[in-house]
Amino acid sequence: MRIVVTGGAGFIGANLCRTLLAEGHEVVALDDLSSGSAANLAGTEARLVTGSILSAESLDQACDGAHAIAHLAALGSVPRSVAEPLPTLAANATGTAMVLEAARRHGGLLTVLAGSSSVYGANPALPKHEGLVPQPLSPYAASKLATETYALAWSRSYGLPVLPFRFFNVFGPLQSPHHIYAAVVPRFVAAALAGEPLIIYGDGQQSRDFTYVGTVAGLLAEALTTGVAVDGPVNLAFGSRVTLLQLVAELSDLLSTPLTVRHEPERAGDVRHSQAANDRLMQLFPHAQPVPLREGLRATVEWMQAQREGAS
């Protein structure tokens, strides 16, 4: 198959490109390189189209002859969206509509989309199941709710096959710790390797359902190549619940060294607890097996150590 991966030079996108190529598929990565990097695709046979999902021309160039789309391009980060909401809404909401229109123009391509667990927001119920009423706490969360509702609207209006996943705290190799809005796992690992304090916003008792990127890439590839389409969102996580202090302890044990934590004030828009109900996921992918947290952390540490050594 020829598969388009928007955001294909980004963290999850580049991991997916590598998974698809290993399975023998042809991959076209569309990325404006605003947060992704062409280096993430170095040494692969993925064809990189440098352009924005807000450009119909770039989308048409990428989608020519394609069989399916993985739509992962987005402007991430809750804090960034709170500071500057409109760019997030343009990229994640309008950008998704542009991708869906491209899928429609090119013959009704299956479109698998990256939504977010952040849409559950202020809803206190645990675990988070897809039937809960979304209560976004940030512009980012609202934009990701738009991502999945646009997909479902295009499906119902035009018969476009879609699969909107809700990702939960994906981590692993290729995830950069070097920008101001870096995610918690690469921030923690980078600080630990540098012998610096690990910064926690709040008391550290907030919990997350961490999902290794290899697990995510494998399920995305299966959905794309087997043609799984649904009429509602699907959590892509496995129901684990780890506090940030537990994550620090796990990392400390893995590195065999004590780690220093520095607490900062809580950030606006942050969700207190996140844990997925995975019933719907397992109905669609009954053989799915997550990579354990410890194994995923080890792979992440090894990759980041190699990056540090390469830069020195």
Image: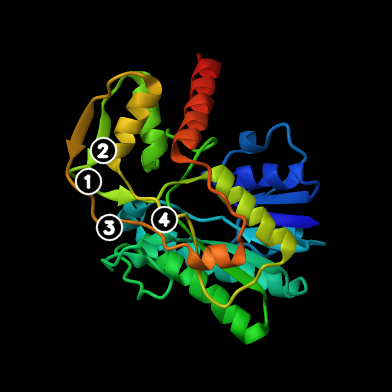
Q: Amino acid at mark 4?
A: Gly
Q: Amino acid at mark 2?
A: Leu
**Mark found first going from the N terminus, 3 or 2:** 2
Image coords of residue 41 (percent x, y): 67, 37
Measure how far apart labels 1 and 4 are at the Cα level.
Answer: 17 Å
Left or right position of 160 against 189: right
Q: Label 1: which residue?
A: 205
Say which of 113 and 168 sits in front.
Answer: 168
Left or right position of 103 against 267: right
Q: Label 3: which residue?
A: 269
Secondary structure of residue under mark 3: loop
CB contact under 8 Å: marks 3 and 2: no
Q: Could you say which quadrant of the image residue 45 lies in?
A: top right
Say which of 247 and 109 sits in front.
Answer: 247
- When the figure is inspected, residue 162 is found, relative to residue 26, above or below; the finding is below
Secondary structure of residue under mark 1: loop
Q: Which of labels 3 and 4 is toward the front?
A: 4
| Residue 239 tag number | 4
Residue at the (40%, 68%) spot, across then down: 129
Secondary structure of residue under mark 2: helix
Measure how far apart labels 3 and 4 are at the Cα level.
Answer: 22 Å
